[in-house]
Image (cartoon, helix red, strand yellow):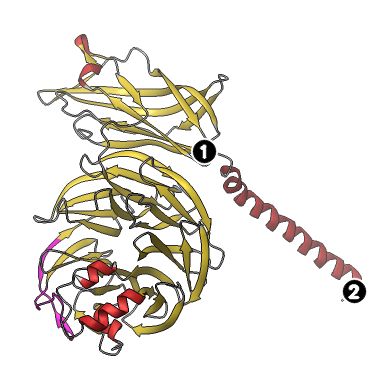
Amino acid sequence: MDSRGFRSKAFIAFVFLIFFVACSNRVERPAIYDRYKGQFSLILNGPEAPIHRIIFEISSVSLTREDGSTVKLTDRTVKIDSFKLKGRQIFLVEKPILPGKYTSLRMVLKNPKVFVEGKESDLVLETEEITLKVDIDIYKNQNTTLFLQWFSDASYVEDGVFEPKFEPREVLPQVARALLFVTNEGSDNVTVINRYTGKIIAIVKVGHRPLGIATGLLRPAKRIYVANSGSNTLSIIDPYNNKVEAEVPIVYGSKPVDVAVAKVSPSREIVIVANYNTDTVSFVDPARRLELDSVKVGSGPISIVVDPPVEDIIGSPFIDPEDMGAIRDYVYNFFNVYVANKNSNEISVIKVNRTRLKVEGIFNVEVDWEPVRLYMDSRRLRVLVANYGSNRLSVINVVEVMKGNIAGAVSTIVNTGTSVVDVIADPYIDRLYLLKEFPPEVIVLRTSSAVGYPRTSGVFPVVDRLLLKGKPTDFFLDPETQTLYVVNQKERVLEVIDKTSLTLKNSIPLGNSPVRVVVFSTGL
């Protein structure tokens, strides 16, 4: 090749490199820029008992800073219906925004109508733009949520005039002691919901791409732990003020996707994190806010559970009296961590010394294709394994694992169908609940043995099912309220389902790409 040809190819390569770098910078810059921003959420509270059905559109929302400058938040048109919004909430805005003080909120309204005796009539709107005085402080890396209460009937005046009545509220009153927490991967935050009223009461900004979430076990200072897959951190949330009190870096692993909590003593707990990209599990001391160590597991660890607290195991009616002595010695000295490895179709069982917090052994149990979720049935001492790529559910006998009978610890429930993304056992009756992605549905199985599970492979009859829409990713059974909470990622809602009748009671709005839900109760 002559020198001119070489220089020509070198020049083309150089231009391509500059173009690639420029494109990369163009893509990354907004993400880096957002690190210096806060986050603002605007939620509209619907009327509690509207008399008139009033419909209008919100076509634009903006905030005005203290210096008079205006920040447009959205120009997406949202249709508001007083009857459909009865007792409910909707998101109007969720957006990164520069820190500072904001003094007014502006909205552009259009096309107001009222339905009287089934007939639609246009309403007169004297001015499309309304301005509300607010006092909002936006802080870096924090979410500020403004709740806007709409009084629909007061907005409808005589002679067909629409005078919209809104009242800004920074927080909702009468927050219950028991809360729901939902991770929103696409919003980098956690939605906090009062499970008795079904209303959002706070939004907590966490790390980038939050996925797994778990509740601490220590009273009275319980905490919420969130695995942030995009920023490689563990967020520690104080649920009593809904603030992040620490971000713990995950140094020994990459892409943390799930988290579980082990109570190692009456005054100490350890957080265990599954790191998907590095095939590792990290052990974090939340009190010291420090990652202690990590161990290698199978390929693609995606879900994690741990043995129940000692008092639950010793008090279990499902332990044979002949085994009680050996089990008691085991649980006072060790606890097991169970990790679902999606890509290697196995469950890693990690034996941890309770006093020294040292791993004393790791062994793998083969299950069916693509295990994606684990559930610890603390009452019956079983680990349920949702195998996404198989039509069989795996069941691991915790007592047999503790006795060292690994080969005889696994049984199977067959003909459950594929695409199961989660599984839950009812603590009071012999029922299993399966959550499927395709078709999206909740399936209820009736168990048949004395401990609720077969000793070998078996078929459990379907006693009920509820078809859903969208893409469900997670669910949680609240035994106190007899309610199933289903995270629907595609619909961006938390679906509230009556467990007994298997009927949909409510849909609560969530952030972008919601993933996981847990129930937090100060009384438990």
Q: Height in image: 30 above or below 151?
A: below
Q: Residue at x 22, y 17 (%)?
A: 154
Image mark for residue 2: 2
- Write down the residue under mark 1: 38
Give the secondary structure at mark 1: strand
Amino acid bearing label 1: Gly
Rendered position, 431 above or below 34:
below
Sequence-earlier tag: 1 or 2: 2
**Which quarter of the figure is the N terminus placed in?**
bottom right
3D distance between C-alphas at marks 1 and 2: 57 Å
* Identity of the residue furthest to the top in this view: 159
Mark 1 vs mark 2: give the one in front: 1
Q: Main secondary structure of the magenta part?
A: loop
Could you classify mark 2 by the number of other residues whose Cα lies within 10 Å: few (under 14), some (14-19), or many (20 or more)? Answer: few
Q: Residue at x 20, y 74 (%)?
A: 416
What percent of the width, then of the height, locates residue 194? Answer: 26, 42
Label 2 sits on what residue type? Asp
Give the residue displayed 13% in from the left and 74% down from the top.
Answer: 452
Front position in the image: 81 or 465: 465
Q: Determine crowd level at label 1: few under 14, some 14-19, many 20+ residues with C-alpha closer than 10 A.
A: many
| Magenta part of the chain | 447-465
Image x and y of residue 521, in percent = 26, 49
Counting the numbered discs, the total is 2
- Asked whether 459 falls inside the magenta stretch, the response is yes
